[in-house]
Image (cartoon, rainbow, N blue to C red):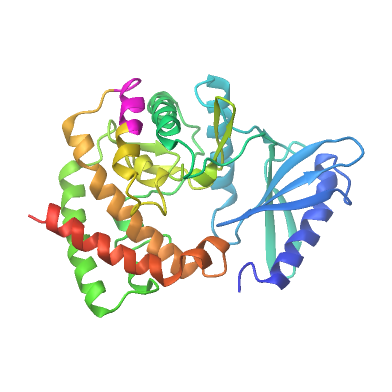
Amino acid sequence: MMYAPEFMERLQNALRSALPAWNMPSDAQLKLLSISENATYLAEDSHSGARLVLRMQRPHYHSDAEIKSELDWVAALRSSGLVHTAEPISTKDGQWVYKIKDGDIVHRITAFSFVSGSEPQLSDDLADWYRILGATTARLHQHSRGWVQPDSFERKHWNFTTLIGEAPHWGDWRLGQGLNNDDIALLEQVQSVIEHRCQVYGQSPQRYGLVHCDMRLANLLVDGDNLCVVDFDDCGFSWFLYDFAACISFLEHEPCIPHLQSAWLEGYQSVCALDEADIAMLPYFVMMRRMQLTAWIAGHAETPTAQSMGSAYGQGTAALGRAFLEEHAA
């Protein structure tokens, strides 16, 4: 199983052998920061004090071209000064993606500068941060609309088909833990309503483009008054306002969400105008994200996030689906 103890040991061994590529000693202290699609570590040289964040890419998830494209956009965002994010760090030989052969696996490793800060917590006054996040997201979207992508640019599309439709990147939501046959039948009705609404809304360049697509709390760092957005690993082409659905990932059922949505919209519209059709899509995007995450949990059962959610998340998806149909079914 991916990220089982034996696999984690292989990851760390591979990572240690790679550290000198960034002028870090192979005996540097390693701290596991997170396991999601990837395993992310902090490496610290106890002698020099140098720190580096290293991401061990999930095997068979992104191609070399996709990873390089992600880093191209991050570098462009940093140059623009519009969004605060970690700096991609190439190896001493100028490589963005460092590869190590490990039996039947090729480990792909990317590195970033260390950014101080901590993840915002539900116990915090999140509305203030979501107001800032909304403005940050709008600036990111401004950059996306105006940036000329390199000819070699390659990232996934996160549309209805690849989110919860016939070719989902994260698997079939019907396999979600806690879902029974009645729940699946109900959510298929939800899926049909969302599909129709997405078709009507369309994918014009003003509504659909390159987005972060995973700006959830775990990918935010706050330090004083500063907000840093990290982990562009899932950036790709989707609806711009799908970024709001992503930023409340795993929290869709919380009673504070309407308050956070209002704050996020206030911040966003202080930078970019939205019309009524845009705002009206938010509950559809939120429900679609919830169903996508239900599939993700089923396919990533070995991760701490999936284990903390379990079947209760799937049952909650069905409950949200019932409420969604009561309000939005035509």
Identify the main secondary structure in magenta: helix
- Which residue of the protein is positioned furthest toward the right in this rendering? 47
Quadrant for the C terminus, please: bottom left
- What residue do we see at 15% from left, 45% from top? 200
Q: Residue 138 lies in what quarter of the image? A: top left
Res. 92 visible in picture? no
- What residue do we see at 31% from left, 63% from top? 317
- What residue do we see at 35% from left, 51% from top? 254
Residue 268, magenta (yes or no)? yes
Horizontal and vertical percent for residue 202?
21, 42
Q: Nearer the viewer, residue 170 or 41?
A: 41
Horizontal and vertical percent for residue 128?
43, 30
Question: Is 78 above or below relative to 98?
Answer: above
Horizontal and vertical percent for residue 2?
61, 69
Q: Residue 241 lies in what quarter of the image? A: top left
Residue 306, magenta (yes or no)? no
Res. 310 visible in picture? yes
Horizontal and vertical percent for residue 3?
64, 67
Q: Nearer the viewer, residue 110 or 306?
A: 306
Side (left or right) of 160 relative to 34: left
Q: Nearer the viewer, residue 91 or 31?
A: 31
- Which residue of the protein is positioned furthest toward the left in this rendering? 330
Magenta residues, as a range? 263-272
